[in-house]
Image (cartoon, helix red, strand yellow):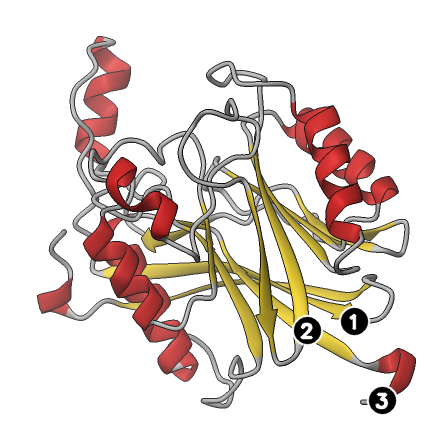
Amino acid sequence: MTGDDKTIKILFFGDMVGKPGRYAVRDFLQNPETFFDCPNDRFKNHFIIANVENASHGFGLTEKNYNELCDYGIHCMTSGNHIWDKKDIINYIDKADKLIRPINYPQIVAGKGSGIFEFNGVKIAVINVLGRVFMNLVDSQWEIVKSEIERLKEITPIIIIDFHAEATAEKICFAKYCAELGCSAFFGTHTHVQTADESIINNTTGYITDAGFCGGCDSVIGMDYKTSLSRFLTGIPERYEIADSKISQINAVEVEINILTGYAVAIKRFYCSRKEIEEENSQ
């Protein structure tokens, strides 16, 4: 494509849960036809983003798994409230140039809340944000993100947001707010249940309330059913375990963006599964 019609495609993976989620994403990128009928090079020229806050046994991200995900071809990793659950995160987050944490943690917190990535000669800005409704209290996102979008707009028209939040109303309202500020795509994460409301807000901003999760299908949002049931029945905070599921799923969203205007021109969600390889199913 040339001129005003030139676009770039973003592929965003919902929350990756444990080894089943990591391997599902790896295989989806390497052999997408094992999940659905499409050419092997379907995502070769996509900028790949994945939410990784649950990637290491369901809670946090180890440096070993960070390096593993880099090798899979993921260009940017976003996170959320579980990003601090693995102790070694503090030791490597400042040198992990593909990883961002929510921008509305206090400024003294390690890591960065946004990043600018260059892909095929195009600069793409990504912001990670944490919601406040039914979540641990962090700084208010409204003015912080407004200021950050304005700053990033001086560098690139393409602004991507991962809003890690619980409440649907907060996600919808914040997405409309970010669309007015010039956001190109807005992906909700955290609930692990993909919503069927993908749309383009104001003819400018690709949107979905929640991108869903990547991991074991036979599970409770990626976790073992019996452990989850026990917690609900007893109210006792028993440790969650990754589901031992023989079927894995991919939840992802593709957004096509005009590189000159920063406007989204198309959006498509993927919800697909395939039988997991037996020996890779352990967590």
- The amino acid type, in three-letter code, at marker 1 is Ile
- Mark number displayed over residue 259: 1
Mark 2 residue crowding within 10 angstroms, few (<14) / some (14–19) / many (20+): some
**116 shown above or below 104:** below
Task: Give the mark toward the camera: 1 or 2.
Answer: 2
How far, Cα to Cα, is label 1 from label 2? 7 Å
Identify the secondary structure beneath mark 1: loop
- Under circle 2, the secondary element is strand
Residue type beneath disc 3:
Thr
- Please tell me which residue lies in front, 86 or 176: 86
Task: Classify 131 as above or below 198.
Answer: above
Q: Does residue 59 show up?
A: no
Nearer to us: label 3 or label 2: 2
**How far across and how far down the image is residue 63, in percent?**
23, 51
N-term mark: 3 or 2? 3
Whichever of labels 1 and 2 marks the residue nearer the N terminus, that label is 2
Please state the horizontal and vertical placement of residue 11, each as a whole percent of the image.
Answer: 56, 66
* Mark 1 touches mark 2? (CB < 8 Å): yes
In whole angstroms, how far apart are the C-alphas of marks 3 and 2?
Answer: 14 Å
- Identify the residue at horizontal 42%, vertical 51% (top origin): 99
Quadrant housing residue 83: top left
Drawn side of residue 173 relative to residue 128, left or right? right
Tell whether 179 sits left or right of 116.
right
The residue beneath circle 2 is 122
